[in-house]
Amino acid sequence: MVLGQASRALVRRFTTSSVMRSQGWQQEGIPGSNLPFDVHNKTKLTLYFILFFSSGLTAPFILMRRHLLIQSSK
């Protein structure tokens, strides 16, 4: 019984302190306030998404082309 009360108190202290720490950068009730990028400018957001996903999709093809060019020159 004592262990259960102690663990509940520990969890409560941790959750309240983590909520208090997060209030410095997070505004509750505003959608997108906790994201690392701005969601209000749709054009800029679209360009960021295109750059992010295209870099991940094209990297293997560019590396394979480079590898094949190096092998063919030997």
Image: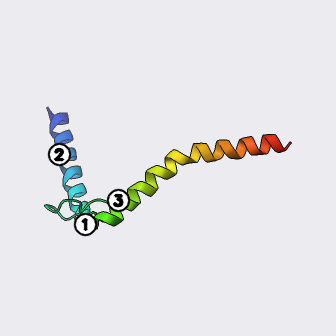
Residue at point 21%, 61% (across, down) = 20
From the image, state whether disc 1 or disc 3 is nearer to you: 3
Residue type for callout 3:
Thr
On the image, the x and y values in percent for residue 65 come to: 67, 44
Nearest the eye: 61 or 23: 61
Residues under labels 1 and 2: Cα distance?
41 Å
Q: Give the vertical position of 28 relative to 15 (above or below).
A: below
**Quarter of image, res 30:** bottom left
Distance from disc 3 to disc 2, alpha carbons, whole Å, reads 45 Å
Dot 1 or dot 3: first in sequence order is 1
User: Which residue: 40% across, 60% down?
Assistant: 48
**How many numbered circles are shown?**
3
Above/below status of 61 relative to 44: above
Q: Which residue is mark 3?
A: 46
- Marks 1 and 3 sit apart, C-alpha to C-alpha, by 11 Å
Q: Is residue 37 visible in this depiction of the protein?
A: no
Say which element carries label 1: loop
- Say whether residue 13 is left or right of residue 52: left
